[in-house]
Amino acid sequence: MAASTPGAVPHAELEVQIGRWRDYVRRREAISAADVDEMEDHLRERVADLTASGLDDEEAFLVAVRRMGNLDAVSREFAVEHSERLWKQLVLVAEPADGGTRSWRELAVVLGCAVGAGVAVKVGSFLLGDDTAFLRNVALLVLPFLAGYLAWKRRVTWQVGVALLVPVAVLATVLNVYPFAPDGSTALLAAIHAPVVLWAALVGVAYVGGRWRSDGRRMDFVRFTGELAIYFALLALGGGVLLGLTAGVFTLADLDLQPALESWILPFCVPGAFVVAAWLVEAKQDVVENIAPVLTRVFTPLTIVMLVAVLGVLLSGGWVVDADRELLILMDAILVLVVCLLLYSISARDPLAPPASFDVLQLGLVAVALAVDAVALVAMFSRIAEFGVSPNKAVALGLNLLLLVHLVRSAALATAFVRRRRPFDPLARWQTRFLPVYAVWAGAVVLVVPPVFGFA
Amino acid sequence: MHIDKDLVAASATPLVLGILADGESYGYAILKRVDALSGGRMQWTDGMLYPLLHRLERLGHVESSWGTSDVGRRRKHYALTAAGRAALAERQLQWSVVADALRQVWQATEDGLRPPRPAEGLA
């Protein structure tokens, strides 16, 4: 900045004006500091050209700023291009001028939904009584309250509101009308997959305010899910410590906290913590966002170590003869973990950053996971051919194949990215495009698998 | 002469890619080049160039790197990638089809307009 040396008095005013312009532009959340640098360089060039053609500093500055264009329109363009930057600002964008009263009202809505979820769980466990029926319905009792809060927050249209009721109605009917065999495996499968369907078709659609086709909004929902898991874990940890200490003191006074814990505290606190965690994610996105990349950097290498150990065990060949079902389910769990880690780190990554060593590490993670899965799948196919299909095996195998497709394509796109053949965007887009497939699959497991296997 | 906004927007990408095909450049220089090429008749909103450049970067058509200007300011340079070169070739084909079609249709109207003129007066 040779032009702005302290001796150059005539330009001092210009420097102040450019400084003010910078601050003003910087307030737009869609425009990053580096973008402001880039635009400032542009502004200074323009000013220099204009002053060279005879304008004074002030005139030149005004013309240059006007030529830069309407900042609202420009920042909207930046926002369209860099939606990941806006993710932390969604709350502020939605907020009207009288932010104060709305935030109090929001707190009231959150607490109302949290208590509502608790009451629903309590009433549900009272009415449904037996454990498997309650287990099947628990997501239906909690998630509508979370979706209700998000729908209120996003001010969804009534069409979207009606669309949100459809999955709830369908699942509530199917889960309670299908004649599931008591303790049958299809009942358990439906219970496990119903929350996945609801998470996508109810919470997801409410979160994106009905704009579920948008890749960017889907990625926001992935971020939301990851952050929600972190917040929920933190709340559960804190709550656990508090309860443990309280129970300790109660024992000294010869009082047992256990009955109250089981029948009142947990049914209210766990669903409530879930809704509150969602609110915290919405309100405090800025804070956690710094943790997300760190967490993925810590856990990606650790997961690689774990997978290599698993691969060693699998290849050593000393398996238990009838470990097939457990093995498949474990493989699914491992691959789901890898996919979550992959999704989460992709969602936290700056899409424009060039490939770095961490991207190679991530590719390594996917490659090892694929190797582990290939070994397990080969073994599984031979066993199924030998012993026939059961609902558990069919569902576990189906999920395994979906994960395999997801990871193989991710590996191909990540390789192209690391080798600078393709940008990062196709890799991110593949993730968001593939996500609905899991929701459809979970829906099929709830709706189609039980009748096919005779509700066994 | 005022050039329609949609037309400016549609031609922005091939123009930027074409300018970068001559060698790496940066935002302000690209705008000045557009200005010179169109004799000052294509006026872009300066700020809108940057989201466009970032989009091209995300699509892998250009690569960016930070350098310094003559006076030592941070400056972001953009260079065309192989994918960008392919995209430019594709755009060139599309635009030559459009330009060719326009030329023909204008030729036809010019030829067709002249003779009927006096006849129209009679109707």
Image (spheres, coloured by chain):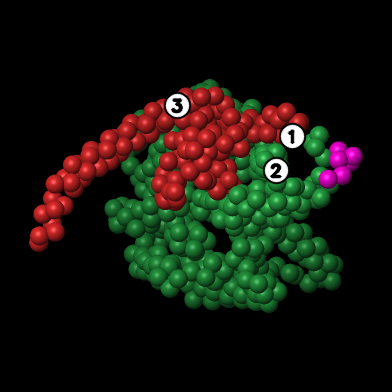
Chain colours: A green, B red
Question: Which amino acid type corresponds to the residue marked 2 in the rendered image?
Answer: Gly
Residue at horizontal 44 percent and vertical 45 percent from the top:
B8
Indicate whether residue A95 is drawn in magenta.
no
The chain carrying label 3 is: B
Query: Which range is magenta?
Result: A5-10
Residue that label 2 marks: A54
The chain carrying label 1 is: B
Q: Are marks 3 and 2 on the same chain?
A: no
Please tell me how crowded label 1 is: few (under 14), some (14-19), or many (20+) other residues with Cα within 10 Å. some
Instruction: Work out which quarter of the rendered image holds the C terminus of chain A and state it.
Output: bottom left
Mark in front: 3 vs 2? 2
Instruction: Tell me which corner region of the image, top left, top right, bottom left or bottom right, holds residue A112.
Output: bottom right
Residue A403 visible (yes or no): no
Indicate whether residue A9 is drawn in magenta.
yes
The numbered mark, 1 or 3, whose residue comes first in the sequence reads 1
Q: Are marks 2 and 1 on the same chain?
A: no
Q: From the top left corner, tell me how far across and down residue B10 is, in percent.
A: 41, 44
C-alpha span from label 2 to label 1: 23 Å
Residue at horizontal 73 percent and vertical 69 percent from the top:
A257
| Image height of B47 relative to A297, above or below | below
Instruction: Tell me which corner region of the image, top left, top right, bottom left or bottom right, holds residue A390.
Output: top left
Residue that label 3 marks: B85
C-alpha span from label 3 to label 2: 40 Å
Please state which of residues A85 and B8 is positioned toward the viewer in this rendering.
B8
Marks 1 and 3: CB-CB under 8 Å? no
Question: Judging from the image, what secondary structure is the residue with disc 3 in?
Answer: helix
| Tag shown at residue B73 | 1
Question: Judging from the image, what secondary structure is the residue with disc 2 in?
Answer: loop
Question: Which amino acid type corresponds to the residue marked 1 in the rendered image?
Answer: Arg
Question: Which amino acid type corresponds to the residue marked 3 in the rendered image?
Answer: Arg
